[in-house]
Image: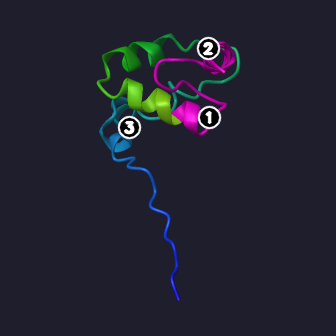
Amino acid sequence: MHFDTITPADETWQAQALCAQTGPDFFFPEPGSSVREAKRICGMCELRSACLDYALTHDERFGVWGGLSEKERLALRRTSG
């Protein structure tokens, strides 16, 4: 009998990203709060593109991922889809 196994995508980048060192508060702010600090941190992170790709692939609907807010990711999906 043969069983196929599913290998999870390599997500080791998450532990190395700058957001992992700062905590989630900046990246998941209360509604109406500024995401400026999260975007500043993302702008310095070498793993920003991996993060954005992850968010788009997994349809992350909350928080700042790869330097983009929920609304910005939605707009990106609409223009590229």
Say which quadrant the C terminus sits in.
top right
Disc 1: which residue:
60
| Mark whose residue sits in front, 3 or 2 | 2
Membership of 28 in magenta stretch: no
Residue type at the position of mark 1: Glu
Q: Secondary structure at mark 2?
A: helix
Could you give the CA–CA distance between mark 2 and mark 1, rounded to whole angstroms?
12 Å
Badge 2 or badge 1: first in the primary sequence: 1
Residue at image x 39%, y 47%? 11
Tell me residue 18's x, y (percent).
33, 30
Q: Which residues are magenta?
A: 55-81
Residue 19 location (% of width, % of height): 40, 31
Looking at the rendered structure, the kind of residue marked 3 is: Ala
Bin the neighbour count of mark 2 within 10 Å (Cα to Cα): few under 14, some 14-19, many 20 and up. Answer: few
Question: Amino acid under label 2?
Answer: Glu
* Gap in angstroms between the C-alphas marked 1 and 3: 17 Å
Residue at mark 3: 20
Residue 58: % across, % down: 59, 40
Tags 3 and 2 in contact by the CB under 8 Å rule? no
Height in image: 41 above or below 58? above
Q: Residue at x 40, y 20 (%)?
A: 42
